[in-house]
Image (cartoon, rainbow, N blue to C red):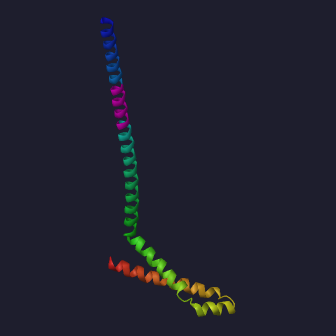
Amino acid sequence: MVVMLVVVVVVVVIVIVVVVVVVVVVVVVVVVVEVVIEVVVVRVVEVVIEEVVVVVVIFDHIFTIMRTPAFTLLLILALAMTIAVCVPLNVNSLQQQQQQSPPAPVQDKDRICAAVAYMRTQLGKYETSI
């Protein structure tokens, strides 16, 4: 009878120890996983936020540059060069150029001079408006 009681007590103690060890291991694993997930998620979010900030700063610089008078003058110059060089060319003149010899370099020089003159008039208008 006493031996039976001792065996039951030993089995109960072993079961309690095993259950406590399993619970402790599960709690430790859950806490470690939570901490790792939190650290990883926080770091990923930080990296994403840093990248978004970099993109926003780059676009802010681009839009700041686009609002400057120098950029406006550059756009006017590009438009003037495009008008002076490209607008006179149409389908008929392209067909004529294919049939005839290429235009003389003086015509290209005249177009460039016209574009520069147009740019100077635009610059003069801009300077007087300041």
Q: Nearer the viewer, residue 78 or 6?
A: 6
Residue 3, position in %: x, y? 33, 6
What residue appears at the point 51 percent right and 81 percent down from the top-left corner? 82
Q: Hey, which quadrant is residue 106 in on the image?
A: bottom right
| Residue at figure coordinates x 36%, y 21% from the top left | 18
Residue 2 is covered by the magenta coloring = no
Q: Is residue 64 left or right of residue 116?
A: left
Magenta portion: prevailing SS class = helix
Horizontally, is 93 left or right of 128 in the view? Answer: right
Picture coordinates of residue 6, whole percent (x, y): 32, 9
> What range of the chain is rendered magenta?
22-34
Residue lying at the far front in this picture: please name it.
1
Locate residue 29: give its quadrant.
Answer: top left
From this view, report whether residue 2 is shown above or below residue 21. above
- Please report the residue visible at 32 percent of the width from the left and 13 percent of the height from the top: 8
Taking depth in this image into account, of 120 and 53 the one nearest to the observer is 53
Q: Is residue 115 left or right of residue 102?
A: left
Vertical arrangement, residue 13 with respect to residue 43, above or below: above
Residue 5 lies, in percent from the top left, at 30, 10
Q: Residue at x 64, y 93 (%)?
A: 96
Work out which quarter of the rendered image holds the N terminus and state it. top left
Q: Between 96 and 20, which is closer to the camera in this rendering? A: 20
Looking at the image, which residue sits at the far top? 2
